[in-house]
Amino acid sequence: MNRTTLTGREQGVKPAGGEERATEPARRLDADPRRAAALLAALLTALAFCAADVVARSYPFGSRTRSVNDLGNQYVPFHAHLWDLLHGRADGGIVFNWQSGYGSSFLPDIGTYVSSPFALLVGVFPRDEIDLAVYVITVLKTAVAGAAMAWLLLSLRRGRWWAAGILGASYALCGWSLALASFNPMWLDGLIALPLFCLVGEWAMAGRRPLPGVLIVALAWIANFYTAYMATLGAALVLLLRLVLAELPWRRALAVVGRAAVIVGLGVGLAAPLVIVVYSGTKHASPGREGHFAPVGADDLFARLLPTTYSYSSPALYVGITALVLALALPFHRKVPVRVRAGWTVLVLAVALSLQWAPTSLAWHAFAAPNGSSYRQAFVLCALLVIAAWHALAYGLPDWRALGAAAVLLVLVAAVASRSTLTQQHSHHTWPVVLLAAAGALGGLALLSLRNGRPVLAGLAAVLLIGAQFGEAAATSAVATHMRLTQMDDYAPWGGRQQRESDAVGQADAWPKYRTEPGRDQTVANDPMMVGGQGSQYYSSLTSDVLSRTMTALGDGWTSRGRSLQSLDNPVTDAVFSVGARVHNPPDPHQKWLPQGGGPSTVTREDVPPLVTVRPAAPRTTPAAFGPSPYRNQELLLGTRVYTLPRTTLSGERKGDEARGLLVDGAQTLTARCQAGSEAFLWAPHYSGTAQLAGGEQQLYRSDAEGTKIAAMQPLGTVRASGRIRVDLKPNRLSRVPAKGAVGCLDTTRLRGAVQQLKATGATKVTVSDGTLHAQLPAGSTGTAVVAAPRIAGWRCSAGGDEVAASEFHGLIAVPLGASATSLTCTFHPPGLRLGTAVGGASLLTLILLGTLSAVRRRAAVRSGERTTTAH
């Protein structure tokens, strides 16, 4: 047998069963170990994941919530909105979301957060068990990732099925999965995709299953394109190494690369209708925070290889001591061919170095600096460590020399890691867990080498290895759960408060006659998706820039540098956006930093204009742009002057300047004079603390010095008969208040008059369905129709049957009306959908043509064979 054929068999280029054409029974027998390994990996993963939450007393096995940071603020609410869509209860559809941000494009959000096939499982859970639904989906995804890796390992090379199952669980329960992806559940689709993509690469090498390969790539990119991109890069590296190790002739190697490229290209093309829409959405999104890469030190890097260490800003590389020991033993394992040892060792080290270099880190993250953790690609390195460990085991157990070298390297890793604060702050459980896991791993491997065919020792070895993996993974997950709760914001799962909010919203809701705001005292940043209604609150990576800029100009507050907008409790903006009902909730008792107080959710109602109003024709000159005063900006949208802006005086020594504002350090008083009976408001976006009008209700303002959050304008109360305003400020940090225009006094009589005028000329009837809005206008309407929704990219309108370009009226949709317009229709088309559909259609057509040509060739070959047989 020539060298190429032998090397190909040794490296497992051909599917399990060798290069000879396997019979059907042989193929079925070959599949059995992979099925058993996949089942074991899934079972171990699910049990360890849930056991960790039992230990941590975390939901659903304890009183501690698991809804930390964006899981509670974004992902659970998006799954809740998906539940509403599946059950026909949402305002809007897959194209447009009328509930959030006063109207937002929803298809990009679907592609970012809930496009995974697993997400559809929320529909089988009760609505008030949405947190449980997300938890079950998270466990299921993690288990499937373990099963996929176990299947891949036995496809790469034959070995003990139970060992493949253990290593599959090691991958699924890696540090990246437990520390990051467990509360970013859409990333778990990438954890599943990577081993599946590697399998597609194996099929490409064998020239088999091109259609399933295309479908796997398409499904993974649809499920979560972000981590699928990283998984594609990782699988490409694995495929290239496999080709190098197989020593194929360069023509055959190029053919394999070509097949793989076509499969990936067609798969990504089929996903293009969603992927391009998401990409286009990012171009119109608020920029948020720009990350800057800074590599971590060697001590922190090595610390993250060990169990029970946690950090959001360092690469979570833990894969279990057993997998780590085997990966460290690989370079010294003499039963493994030198090329295999060198190839996998070099690939692991190269990818590890790429995590620490800014240009390659940027490439891993699709050339966009991540807003948050800089090591989101760490799961690829975890996968390579596990595959390297499998090669160290599948060629035969490492001898004592290799295990001794691995043990020495493990001690060196631990020594360097001991200098890290990540191990020092958890030393009381990190080192005991490391020692027990190392004893279990080394003891289990030693028993396997000594068993001499005795099944009892083999069974004991399996128990030791499984027990070590189970225990350290559960401990690592429990520590990560605890640390997230101490370092991040957290939110309560669905309970009595959310149910009362939902009931209050449901009783007041009359959409689209008017909007119902779920309230400024929100439970999560996406309250409209959680409890219903149609509010300004919206938190997404795709929050539009025009919405963020418009609401900021009107005095709204936000967090996440403008991507998480709050509710603006203001009667002028309520009139502008047709908010006819507003829910007022007591402070969330889960947030201990808030003033504690109970009480029911109440609703206030206002007479407001319809969703579509008609304004006078815009002058030929350029209309006035937003200025520095949110009060004047609100008047621009309303069309009437309703505020008085008094001169304010701040007690104490004057510090600061007019441009940046006056410094507030300690309790101070802000005074002004206004018309008696008017409503006083305070706008202080960079103030943090409480503000209270004498005799009024205390209001809380939240901002930070870094500029990641600003405070919203808030009502202080009614101005007394004396006309004197005294606002007591009690900051909780060094803050600033505007030197001019901080206080605004609203003339409610003027506001009511403006509302009546807008109602008189506004639409007589408005209907909406998904991304379409239709309004009946009074006869003889002229001027400009203004829709109380942000003018995000994608809107097209027609007035009286004539197609016209949707323009902008201070951030809102505006449509010029002809002389005979009695109706208005606006339709939303997600940017990028047309191009994505064209690319997807071309990919589908190409796939059909290639499939047809392949079928024709196979049929021609069969007929040729039949003619040859007949001739003989």
Image: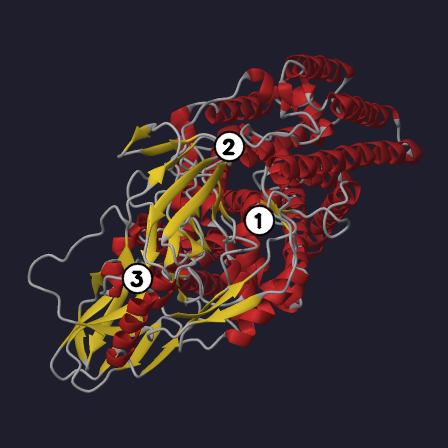
Disc 1 residue crowd, few under 14, some 14–19, many 20+, Cα 10 Å:
many
Q: Amino acid at mark 2?
A: Tyr
Residue 325's label in the rendered image is: none
- Tell me the distance, in whole angstroms, between the alpha carbons under discs 2 and 3: 34 Å
Looking at the rendering, which quadrant does residue 797 occupy? bottom left
The residue that disc 2 covers is 375
Q: Position of residue 752 (x, y in %)?
A: 32, 71
Q: Are marks 1 and 2 in contact (CB under 8 Å)?
A: no
The residue that disc 1 covers is 71
Q: Position of residue 109 (x, y in %)?
A: 44, 56
Q: Is residue 547 above or below residue 576?
A: above
Q: Are marks 2 and 3 in contact (CB under 8 Å)?
A: no
Q: Is any part of residue 157 visible from this angle?
A: no
Horizontal side, residue 428 vs residue 284: left or right: right
> Closer to the camera, 544 or 235?
544
Outermost residue toward the bottom in this view: 779
Q: Amino acid at mark 1?
A: Leu
Q: Nearer the viewer, mark 2 or mark 3?
A: 2
Could you tell me which secondary element the residue under label 1 belongs to? helix
N-terminal of the pair, mark 3 or mark 1, is 1
Could you tell me which secondary element the residue under label 2 belongs to? loop
Q: Position of residue 834 (x, y in %)?
A: 29, 63
Outermost residue toward the left in this view: 620
Which residue is rendered at x = 37% and y = 47% of the image? 683
- Tell me the distance, in whole angstroms, between the alpha carbons under discs 1 and 2: 18 Å
